[in-house]
Amino acid sequence: QRRTPIKWRGDHLKEQIRIIGKWNETKDFSHFSLPVKKGESFRDKLKDLEPQNIFPLVVNVLACFLFMMNNYIIAPSSAYYAEALGCNDALSGIMVGAAPLFAMSSSVVYSYWTNYNYKHPMLFAATLQIIGNLLYASAFSYKSIRMCLIGRAITGLGAPRVINRRCLADVTPFSLRTTASVVFGLATALGAAFGPGISIVIDRIDEFQFKLPLLGDQFFNPMTGPGYFMCVNWIIYAATICFFFKEPKRTGLEELKRRETGQMDADSKKESLLDSVTSSSASKQKIILHDVETKNSLSADSSYCEEDGGSLACDSLEFSASHDEEIDDEPEEKESCCSCFKHLTRPVLICMTLVFFKRVALESIVGASPIVTKNRYGWSIEDVGALQVVNGLIIIPACLVAGYLSTKYEDRLMALCFLSVTLIGMVIMFDLSDLMNYHTGVTYNECFM
């Protein structure tokens, strides 16, 4: 009988796995000729989403957008800001990278905090964003690079990305999990592109001076404007959370628990079925042999106790027998916090490594572009902002193409292709002339100063 090949990629992968499961049980190849059922429409899947969860999801997507915009809005002007504060413009890379660095330390706290509620950690993160952006912008008046870097560090501590991802996983049902992930990624890409675009608009605003309570005279210019702009946005966001946000229903988490419970019940039923199907003759032979061995061992042990009068040996024998009977009744030990590492397979480890190096490549380019373009080509804030807007907008169609091609090709092939593109781009930007010494005594940091 001819076996119908199965296409292992595409929208019907779950149905194909179900067909293979039926074949595994019945060994009947007729299941492969069954027509694949059409999935539910997107409108039908939206009915699975609780109405009370819509606003919390929108707020979390907005927080993701604001944070990414906050990260990249300072990149075009960071080199000029470091120079205005009396430091080498190479510190602009630290100004850009301080937020992601400190976000790693706060992610653990937010992850634990969201086990109880979402509103409080979101308000706390928004408050840190307000303070951090205000310190970053106010550093210009005090000519303090330390104040600027402290502001960026506080901004990183207020990163709400972990809260947003946790809410996405706990609130959305399984039928909409992929759609919610796409929206989350789209908000990330739009925020990364929108931030440099706002810096271009701020660059065209004439500088003016104003006063703030406790901080005194302040300046709004292309270098401090991004900080004040994001501070106002986070204030509006915090007010929205404070007055309108209500705790969502964790339908996704409840659905996951039900699935795990159902899977455990199914596994127990399968085990009981296998036990019942076991040959009775074989089980009887095992029982007879086990009884004979047990009687022989008990008679030998009892004779040893009677001859030697060894009460200690008899007591230990009785303890071991009772211990064997009670060992099954002991509750299972709880898994430790490091038990997740047992699920760290090779594909997962490779994917995590690729994500890490992807972020290193991206952040190195974002942090170095304002320095290189300012000193080598004499670009203005508007020029650097336009470059980063284009880079951010390219991510959107690239993600859409990657999502479509992932249904046609294997993941490892997709990862290899996109990593090759990244490698080619990095090699093109590498200038071998930087390794040569022309004995001119003039560096690129001095050409346009």
Image: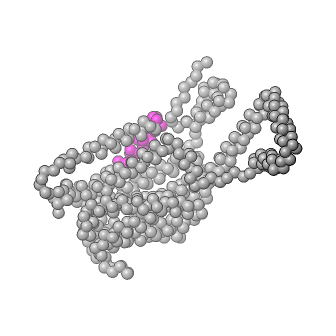
Residue 105 visible: yes
**Residue 399, position in %: x, y?**
41, 45
Placement of the C terminus among the 4 image quadrants: bottom left
Name the residue: 50% across, 34% down. Answer: 9
**Residue 207, position in %: x, y?**
26, 71
Q: Return the residue nearer the eye: 411 or 320.
A: 320
State the image quarter where residue 415 is shown.
top left
Q: Does residue 398 appear to the left or right of 174 in the view shown?
A: left
Outermost residue on the right side: it is: 306
Q: Does residue 133 appear to the left or right of 444 in the view shown?
A: right
Name the residue: 68% across, 47% down. Answer: 261
Count of residue discs:
0
Q: Does residue 34 appear to the left or right of 243 in the view shown?
A: right
Q: Is residue 235 magenta?
A: no
The residue range painted magenta reads 392-410
Placement of the N terminus among the 4 image quadrants: top right
Name the residue: 36% across, 59% down. Answer: 97
Q: Main secondary structure of the magenta part?
A: helix
- Residue 193, above or below 41: below
Q: Return the residue nearer the eye: 339 or 308.
A: 308
State the image quarter where residue 13 is shown.
top right
- Residue 351, above or below 251: above
**Residue 41, position in %: x, y?**
56, 43
What colour-coding does the image apply? one colour
Outermost residue on the front side: it is: 308
**Residue 314, position in %: x, y?**
83, 47
Name the residue: 37% across, 69% down. Answer: 150
Outermost residue on the left side: it is: 440
Residue 200 visible: no
Q: Is residue 393 magenta?
A: yes
- Residue 31, above or below 216: above
